[in-house]
Amino acid sequence: MGHVFPRHTKTNLPTAVSGEGCYIIDQNGKHYFDGSGGAAVSCLGHSDQTVQEAIKKQTDQLAFAHSGFFTTEPAEKLADLLVANAPKGIDRVYYVSGGSEAVEAALKLARQYHLERGDKDRSHVIARWQSYHGNTIGALSAGGNKWRREPFMPMLVPMSHIDPCYPYRDQQEGESDEAYGVRAANRLEEEILKIGPEKVSAFICEPVVGATMGAVAAAPGYLKRIREICNQYGVLLILDEVMCGMGRTGTLFACEHDGVTPDILCIAKGLGAGYQPIGAMLCSRKIYNAIENGSGFFQHGHTYQGHPTACAAGYAVISTMLERNLLDNVNKRSEQLMQALTDAFGQHPFVGDIRGRGLFIAIELVKDRETKTPFDPKLAVHAKIKKTAFENGLICYPMPGTIDGKNGDHVLLAPPFIIQDEH
Ligand code: PLP
């Protein structure tokens, strides 16, 4: 009908016309409870006045100034706020417009860091299977979702993938959580040794896996061991917190839970909370210094990086989150939601696992609980759940199982941090 090129060309979508707290309202006045914040984006709901006013104030004053010519107050203020609340060691904020861009910047910064130090052979990236890092070519190459990768395989950059940390399917009978965490992390060391440490630039992973596996948190000790291995072999650690960061798991940065500081950290989604498209790549002083004391120029950039209006929105989002103690509500509602899901579905014959952290919770579906056998992806169980929920006024985020049967369909819930009892 219209000229918009939608992602799904064979479905007719309702028109979203307004937002009220946790709800989106369509052209017929139907209310949809945003139980997944879209794709874990809308952490403050859809009508936060502080953010809306900050955007208006900034556009009235100055909507845009190119970052090649100017810095701006919103960009400076947001960077200071993020660094003040980031894990110790994180020192600089490089702005982008979304998650994939943050990952692209991270992969390139890692490479340039090694070049600046004369380590010219280090370019290889190690990532994990069943991960998602975005849809641009570099990010897709790092991602380990075979279905997403398949059509574009000839275009992807060669990278290695190790198996993820996935307690539900991978932890052995009688193996402690900690022993499993270390065993899973040691796969990185094996891969580094296989490639040759002198060639490896970086390892990238999500501290809590979102889109491909569904809210799978790293086992205790996993990320600590990963950090040790990276340090030992001079490999940079990139944590992709595009989905799980910005308060989603109950701490502002997801890696706080693991007590690990990466060299480079990617954020987006909750940073702009859907009010503006913004992402960022944060890095440690060590990485920044290599550029500053070397060429003095990061050979990467986008027109809209550091967009003042987006930064003003990001500052309003994060300061609102902190000033209103919304992370306390994330932790409180997390327990409530987990309990409610366990009561409702804990014994369901098709529910294999209910897991997550903070307001980042997923249900993994299986055909058989005993054998953990996933449904045949051709049945598109996830799509049926999405449709039924949506018809009933619930937005949730179901995703298919992987085409190699390594995990089942899952339903991801990531409601706004403002949810209350009645929701
Ligand atoms: N990284 C992770 C972990 C994500 O979940 C996503 C999106 O879902 C991305 C990167 C890509 O972000 P964007 O869609 O904003 O490009």
Image (spheres, grey):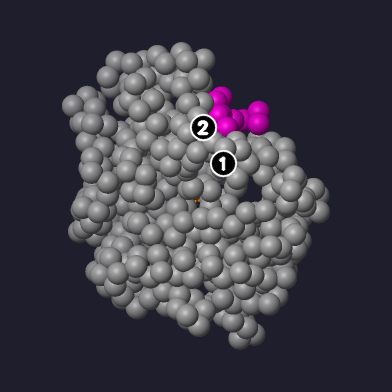
Q: Residue at x 53, y 48 (%)?
A: 216
The image position of residue 359, as x and y in percent, is 47, 63
Establish if 406 lies above or below 316: above
Reading the chain from its start, which is encountered first: label 2 or label 1?
1
Identify the image quadrant of residue 358.
bottom left
Q: Residue furthest bottom?
A: 29
Q: Is residue 9 left or right of residue 342?
A: right
Q: Secondary structure at mark 1?
A: loop
Instruction: Inspect the magenta stretch and tell me whether residue 160 lies in it.
Output: yes
Q: Is residue 220 left or right of residue 159?
A: left
Q: Residue at x 43, y 20 (%)?
A: 200
Residue type, mark 2 in image: Ala
Does the residue tagged 2 have its C-beta within 8 Å of any atom of ligand 1? no
Q: Residue at x 56, y 41 (%)?
A: 166
Instruction: Inspect the magenta stretch and tell me whether residue 128 lies in it.
Output: no
Q: Is residue 36 left or right of residue 358?
A: right
Res 166 label: 1
Q: Are marks 2 and 1 in contact (CB under 8 Å)?
A: yes
Residue extent of the magenta highlight: 153-163
The image position of residue 22, as x and y in percent, is 49, 76
Establish if 411 lies above or below 44: above
The image position of residue 275, as x and y in percent, is 41, 67
The image position of residue 184, as x and y in percent, is 51, 32
Give the labeled residue for mark 2: 184
- Look at the image and tell me in which quarter the N terminus lies: bottom right
Q: Secondary structure at mark 2?
A: helix
Residue type, mark 1 in image: Tyr
Q: Residue at x 22, y 24 (%)?
A: 294
